[in-house]
Image: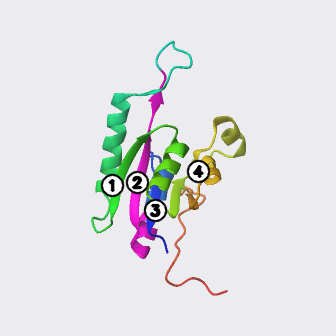
Amino acid sequence: MYRNIVVAYDGSDGAKAALGKAVEIAAKDGAALTVVESVPEQLPALVPGAPRSTDPNKAAETRKELREAVEALDPSLQASPWAVGGPPAKAIHAVAEDIEADLIVTGSRGRGPIRSAVLGSVSTEILQGASCDVLVVHPPSAEHPPASVDLEHPPPG
């Protein structure tokens, strides 16, 4: 049974699937839900090695998107948005540590091993650095529709 769940959210199909699964678990367990989105950062122009600064326009857009996602959830859920700067996996880990999360739910873009090796995988980074349980949720597709899982009545065996 989980008490504090962190959901990595970026508006993608994978993130929406993760949010749906996290809501399902939170409702079943009566857990608090913290929906986290990393605010993109950008480097100041032509200054190598300079500290990163957050793009204020993108930050406002991210906060609005995050707030709308949380407001769309069932009001009976204890859910809160949390926008934080920095690389996504590090941001998720920091929030999870701060609220003493016992589960992180994240989506997967399904890039495959080669593209993930080149482009990186936030879900892999979250898995590798988490100090609590992690659930990676893949978005449904025509080939793999969402599975229906009855958590109250698991299959025998």
User: Residue 54: image x %, image y %?
Assistant: 41, 29
Which residue has dot 3 on it?
5
Of residues 110 and 2, the one drawn nearer to the viewer in this rendering: 2
Which residue has dot 2 on it?
35
The residue sitting at 46% across, 69% down in the picture is 25
Which residue has dot 1 on it?
70
Which residue has dot 4 on it?
126
Res. 152 visible in picture: yes
**Nearest to N terminus: mark 3 or mark 1:** 3
Q: Is residue 31 magenta?
A: yes
Q: CA distance from mark 2 to mark 4?
A: 15 Å
The residue sitting at 53% across, 50% down in the picture is 93
Of residues 40 and 71, the one drawn nearer to the viewer in this rendering: 40
User: Few, some or many C-alpha atoms within 10 Å of disc 2 (few <14, some 14-19, many ≥20)?
Assistant: many
Q: Secondary structure at mark 1?
A: helix
Q: Which residues are magenta?
A: 22-43
Looking at the rendered structure, the kind of residue marked 2 is Val
